[in-house]
């Protein structure tokens, strides 16, 4: 299955359209939590198959980021998920 990765998406915007480059616009006055990565099953949005956080740091990603993603996974729009999305934690120095 092909997947599309959307960077810097807000949960409330996850149901909106993607730009031609596969990214989403972020509203000037954000509403709802932001996730660094949203993976969908098609470029137009589609079903959410993974969400994640990306950090550029010398230290490991803290477990609180995982807990936050677990919470956010539970509040995704039901029309956008068929099964619980995978959780991604990405870190690099």
Image: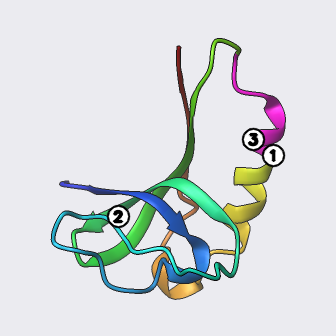
Q: Which of the 4 quarters of the picture holds residue 73?
A: bottom right
In this image, 44 relative to 58: left or right? left
Looking at the picture, how far across and down is residue 65, in whole percent? 75, 41
Q: Secondary structure at mark 3?
A: helix
Q: Residue at x 49, y 66 (%)?
A: 9
- Residues under labels 2 and 3: Cα distance? 21 Å
The residue that appears at 70% across and 17% down in the rendered structure is: 60
The answer to which of 68 and 1 lies nearer the viewer is 68
Please state which of residues 10 and 50 is positioned toward the viewer in this rendering. Answer: 10
According to the picture, the residue beneath numbered tag 2 turns out to be 40
> Which residues make up the magenta segment?
60-67
| Callouts 1 and 3 close, C-beta under 8 Å | yes
Which of the two discs, 2 and 3, labels the residue nearer the N terminus? Answer: 2
Judge from the rendering whether residue 14 lies leftward or rightward of residue 89; answer left or right: left
Query: Residue 47: percent from the left, percent from the top?
Result: 38, 73
Q: Which residue is mark 1?
A: 67
Answer above or below: position of 78 versus 43: below
- State which tag comes first along the sequence, 1 or 2: 2
Q: Which residue is mark 3?
A: 65
């Amino acid at each position: 299955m092909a997947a599309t990765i959307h960077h810097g998406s807000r949960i409330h915007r996850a149901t909106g359209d993607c730009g031609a480059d596969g990214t989403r616009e972020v509203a000037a006055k954000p509403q709802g939590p932001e996730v660094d990565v949203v993976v969908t099953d098609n470029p137009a949005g589609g079903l959410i198959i993974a969400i994640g956080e990306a950090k550029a740091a010398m230290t490991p990603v803290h477990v609180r980021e995982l807990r936050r993603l677990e919470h956010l996974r539970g509040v995704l729009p039901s029309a956008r998920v068929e099964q619980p999305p995978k959780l991604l934690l990405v870190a690099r120095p």
